[in-house]
Amino acid sequence: DGLGIIARSGDVERLASRAMDGAGGLYFVPALVGLGAPHWDPYARGVIVGIERGTTAAHVARATIESMAFQTLDVVEAMERDAGVKLRGLRVDGGAVVNNDLLQFQADLLGKTVARPKVNETTALGAAYLAGLATGVWKGLSEITENWALDREFRSSMTPRARSQRVAGWRKAVERSRSWVDPPAYEAGLRPLSAHPPNTAGTSTSSAAGPPACPHSSTSRSTGSFPGPAPRS
């Protein structure tokens, strides 16, 4: 946390809970290294919009949590359009799913049930399952499927009108973040005011800056636009 608002990631949920009015109209678009799927804009940069006199650190924390749910909504909608299949529900995993407020907001935005398993570190569990299949601990995938156990379900409680208003605000915020860095200047190695200060260590600014990450590169996909671990379907 470069802003010094929190000492560790686990403090975010506690801080966000102090915002009794939710994010208070605040939106945070964490395009810190550009926007990933489905926008693919390497020239976008992070923005916080909707700041008012009453905005507090708790509102910023809440907006940060909500940004993960908004980004998941963007990807889910893109998947539904491309596949021609409507999502019936979302099973999530990863470190962020311990945050109940995040999963409730995710269910509200999707208008669908979000299910959290008892074992939320599915990546590690999957590696163990593969090892078990190779060594004969389990006979097949059906046996593994039966091991999945539900911890808690989150059901949407947001009205369609409220959902539409929140999503519309997010879309506006995303548009504000797009094309923030001028492509020709960035590719020439020139730093805009919003970027890092010039290199003074003897290396040319051009070589230090380098070209922007290709939106289809592995680096862009892995860093993406998430501030931290996010729910995975």
Image (cartoon, grey):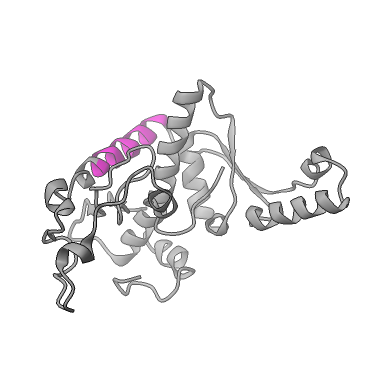
Q: Of residues 226 and 34, which is closer to you in this image?
A: 34
Question: Can you see residue 20?
Answer: no
- What residue do we see at 49% from left, 57% from top? 229
Q: Which residues are magenta?
A: 160-174
| Residue 88 at x, y percent in the picture | 59, 29
Q: Is residue 193 left or right of residue 133?
A: left
Q: In which quadrant of the rendered view does residue 227 lie?
A: bottom left
Asked whether, in this view, residue 126 is left or right of residue 16, the answer is right
Instruction: Name the residue furthest bottom.
Output: 201
Compared to 160, does 21 lie above or below? below
Residue for point 47% across, 40% down: 108
- In magenta stretch: residue 190: no
Q: Main secondary structure of the magenta part?
A: helix
Q: Judge left or right: residue 24 versus residue 138.
A: left
Q: Where, quadrant-wise, is the N terminus in this rendering? A: bottom left
Tell whether position 163 is magenta.
yes
Q: Quadrant of residue 6?
A: bottom left
Q: Quadrant of the C terminus?
A: top right
Residue 200, compared with residue 103, is above or below; it is below
Q: Position of residue 188 (x, y in %)?
A: 14, 54
Measuring from the top left, give residue 226's x and y in whole percent: 40, 53
Would residue 82 appear left or right of 22 to someone viewing this image? right
> Would residue 69 be visible to someone looking at this image?
yes
Residue at left offset 49%, top offset 69%: 10
Say which of 56 and 184 sits in front: 184
Residue beneath the point at 81% across and 38% down: 142
The image shows a total of numbered marks equal to 0
Which x, y percent locates residue 100? Answer: 54, 54
